[in-house]
Image (spheres, rainbow, N blue to C red):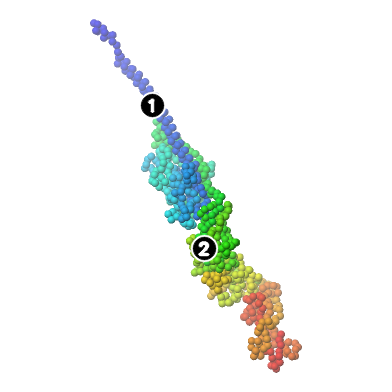
Amino acid sequence: MSTRQHHRNQRGFTLAEILVTTAIFAIIMLAALAVYDRSNRVFKTSTEAADLQQSTRIGFDKLVSDVRMAGFDYSRGGIPQQSWQAPQPDEQIEYAGPTAVVFRANFNYNLGASTSNGLEPAYTPVNVNAQPIFPYVTTSNDEIIAYVLRSTTASANTNSISFYVDDFRPRSAFPSTLTPAPAGSNPSRSEEAVTITGIDTSNGNPPYTLYRVSVSDVRNGSLGTPVAENIRSLNFQYYTDFNGSTLLKNPDGTDITSGRDAGGGTFATANTGAIGGDGQYNPNSIGTTTNFNDRGQRALIASMRVSLVGMNASPDLQGYSNPNEPIAAIQSYRQYALSSLVVPRNLGMTGFPEPSFNPPAPPTIVGMCLGHCGAPVIYWTAPVAGGEVVSYHIEWDTNQNGAYTSSIDITDPTATSAILPDDGASDVSLTRYYRMEALNDNGQSPPSNPPWPAIPQNRTRPQAPTLLQGTGGQANQIPLRWTAPSNNESPNNQLSCSGPGITSTNGTTIPPQEVVKFRVYRGTNANFNPAAGEGVMVLDFPSGSQPPLAPPGYTVNWTGGGGNSAYPAANCVDYYYRVQAIDRCYRQANWNIPNDATGANSMSAFDPAVGSPAAGPFRSTVNSPTPIPPQVPPSASADTATPMASGCPDPLNLMSPNCRVTLQWTKVLSDTAGNRIGVDSYVISRASRLQQAGGAYVPDATFGTAGSLTVNCSTGTCADGYTQTPTANMNKFVDTPPFLNNGGLVLEYQ
């Protein structure tokens, strides 16, 4: 009994109770788990948002920070100041794309104190004298930077960008014609095309990683440095103003709808101003490459809008959907957009040459070429020390220790040669000593030493002038014009040179520093030959009426009339002309090499050439309603001053029964109105009487009709009345009348 009673007093949970309790605990656990899950989702979303913002902002800040540096200290030296230097072709923005950009800056300026704040000696080209060809190279290939996107989907990275850049080490985009020459291991070359491959420029395959890629990375096969992950898109816009309101345009002023890669590729780029990276710089043919003017447009960029959009690493767990996202696969990814108008303060600016407070060292004369009459060619190299050169002073003297008062100034600081001007008077057979000084605002160098000796004799012969023409129909004058020769005649067109710095011995071109003048000959028939003494020289080298010195190849004008000629043209007479070029070394035999007593080495052939008709006929004409008579000639007189000119019997034939009477009279050169004329003929009258009888003179019918004889000047019976002899010369006529009549009585004449 007791045992049974004991078991009735032991109580427990029924199955129902246990089930109820379990349900209650399950509800509590589910509630707790729901709260936890909600909290976890909120926490995860907050963490991802923070990561998104932080990652995007870090990438954006790095990108914007570098873009603000674009162009910094890229051309520290500015315009080259030395003759051996060349301008750097570097651009501040090398490539302007809608989703990628390439620019340069001296990023290691603060880190490179040991190399003068970021100078790049390894990239600096030099000439054979070890002088820098570019004043300062401050950007290495590590400092030419691109920002590009690469998709996490490797197969989507099929795009590329291309641009031209001088990426040689050392740099090589300088002219091959520099003097001194570039070092042999560093030849002149055009810019190279640099292509960054394996990128996506479409913004259509996110997520992306933002990369910072240098030219060194490209050349080394490296992808570059990743800057930020989970990037949705990257965009650039380029403006020519600081306010971001005027997009960059094409060189012709049209909107840019298609950008241009180096080498000819294109890409769509509406409403971005993205012009690309075409326009190769060829230092030996600047401006001739395709799309070269694109370089000038990139130089106009003043501001850039940079837009970077980041995205979550995973889709949102709370059902978020972006209604503005065109790619359905990432609509559930939250995004974070950053945009800024960046105004790089260095764009459009270049360096200014560092001032020097020292005068330059003297230049070095390295050679001279001789052959132009009195106008040698001098060659020199620029100073290798001291301050920059602003100009040069070249001086010479026939005494090595003289005052050196003859000189010229060369205002081009890059010049390395010059043709010295002939003074038109000095003896070119004497040795001259030449020396130079270099000058700047701080003073002048000492003269180069020792002076360079040279004898500037003539070795060249000018070609004949061309296109001789005249104008008739003008009163008292015949205007002429011709083209001055530009070249010397072969084989007399080579210079004699000495010294190591000579670049050419070619003396074909007549320099304007050589004094070349003209001779003009006139005849009264088309075939006259001046070399045979025919015609007259109406213009000579020393004539005061020489036309102004004209540069070679220019048109020369000269008027043959009045006081311009020793033989003024007569009106109403047909004249023919030939012209000849002549340098002043014709005057003296030893002024020419070889020694030339005739001066022929200094004289050109004639134009028109002898053997062909001379230029003409030209005649001056006086228009008058009524004929104008010639002036009355003065009375003739017998020439008794010239031995053997006059006498009875004939002094030249004492056995002759005749006298010799040389009549002379002043030429008639004008009509009664003062117009210059050519006299066709003179009428000479002769009368006689018996010396013993005296009385009146009777016209001598044996001389001519009624005692008068017409002397025709045009046929040469008298001295040429067409002023083909000097105007001061007397006209003369020789008469040989008998001195006895038939009865043996002595006659006298008037």
Instruction: Give 44 or 541, whichever is nearer the viewer.
Output: 541
Q: Position of residue 332 (x, y in %)?
A: 41, 34
746 to the left or right of 334: right
Query: What residue type is disc 2 on?
Result: Met
Q: Quadrant of the N terminus?
A: top left
Instruction: Give 437 or 156, whichever is nearer the viewer.
Output: 437
Assign a secondary structure to mark 1.
Answer: helix
Q: In the rendered image, which quarter is residue 530 located in?
A: bottom right
155 to the left or right of 697: left
Circle 2 is placed at which residue position?
368
Q: Are marks 2 and 1 in contact (CB under 8 Å)?
A: no
Q: Position of residue 574 (x, y in %)?
A: 61, 74
Answer above or below: position of 661 versus 176.
Answer: below
Labels 2, 1: front one: 2
Query: What residue type is disc 1 on?
Result: Asp
Q: Position of residue 507 (x, y in %)?
A: 51, 65
Counting other residues with Cα less than 10 Å from the Cα at mark 2, is it few (<14), some (14-19), or many (20 or more)? many
Answer above or below: position of 331 versus 272.
Answer: above
Q: Report, in whole angstroms, how far the alpha carbon at label 2 lies from the one at label 1.
A: 95 Å
Q: Position of residue 364 (x, y in %)?
A: 52, 58
59 to the left or right of 680: left
Dot 2 or dot 1: first in sequence order is: 1
Circle 1 is placed at which residue position?
37
